[in-house]
Image: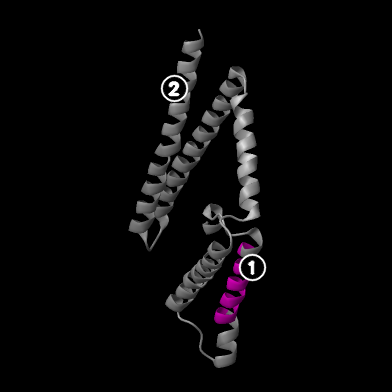
Amino acid sequence: IWALFSRRLTGKATLTITISCLLLNILGKLLLPWFSGSGLSKAEEMLLGVLAPLLMLMVVEWRARKRISACAEWEAYQAIRTRRDLSLSATSPEELGETQVQNRFGLRVTAVALAFTGFLLCMLSLFAEQGVAWLRIMSALVALAAIIPWHAARNIGNLTNSSEHGNA
């Protein structure tokens, strides 16, 4: 997720950190118990899995900040976004309306999928022997999360309807 928002982190650095952390976790989880006879506790495994990538990302970001303001991949991405934004501004109203219809449909599908997943989790909680309360809380949160895309779809529908009335 860090790489999605960083201007300085390259794809190569992200892949290197991912592989390094995977190897470090394999070392801690599999090889350390085999050589020493005792492995890491669950808490230590979790700390290693969170802190190792975090520290590596911080170091790479800090070193890159001293050298460059943004990596070449970020600059290329910004140029593509600028070209895309310019081409979208030249889009016809009919094409824009079709895009909004497709977006509204996709948001509605996402909302229904989230609501159905929440329902399935709730049904699963009827058969669970342990963690019933947590399962019901999660099912409620997932079902409630369906409100976000549903509301966004309604807003797109309102925009489409108001633009159609404005053109009439």
Residue at 52% across, 58% down: 2
Residue at 58% across, 63% down: 67
Residue at disc 2, secondary structure: helix
Q: On the picture, is 131 further left or further right than 61? A: left
Query: How packed is label 2: few (under 14 Cα within 10 Å), some, or many (20 or more)?
Result: few
Between circles 2 and 1, the one closer to the viewer is 1
Q: How many labels does the image show?
A: 2
What secondary structure is the stretch in magenta mostly built from? helix
What percent of the width, then of the height, locates residue 128?
41, 59
Residue at 58% across, 77% down: 24
Vertical order, 86 against 128 (above or below): above
Vertical order, 126 against 148 (above or below): below
What percent of the width, then of the height, locates residue 162?
45, 17
Q: Name the residue under label 2.
A: 158
Q: Nearer the viewer, residue 79 or 50?
A: 79
Which amino acid, mark 2? Asn
What percent of the width, then of the height, locates residue 134?
36, 58
Which amino acid, mark 1? Thr
Q: Name the residue under label 1.
A: 16
What percent of the width, then of the height, locates residue 109?
52, 35
Residue at disc 1, secondary structure: helix
Q: Residue furthest bottom?
A: 36
Q: Which of 80 and 111 is in front in this view?
A: 80
Extent of the magenta region: 14-29
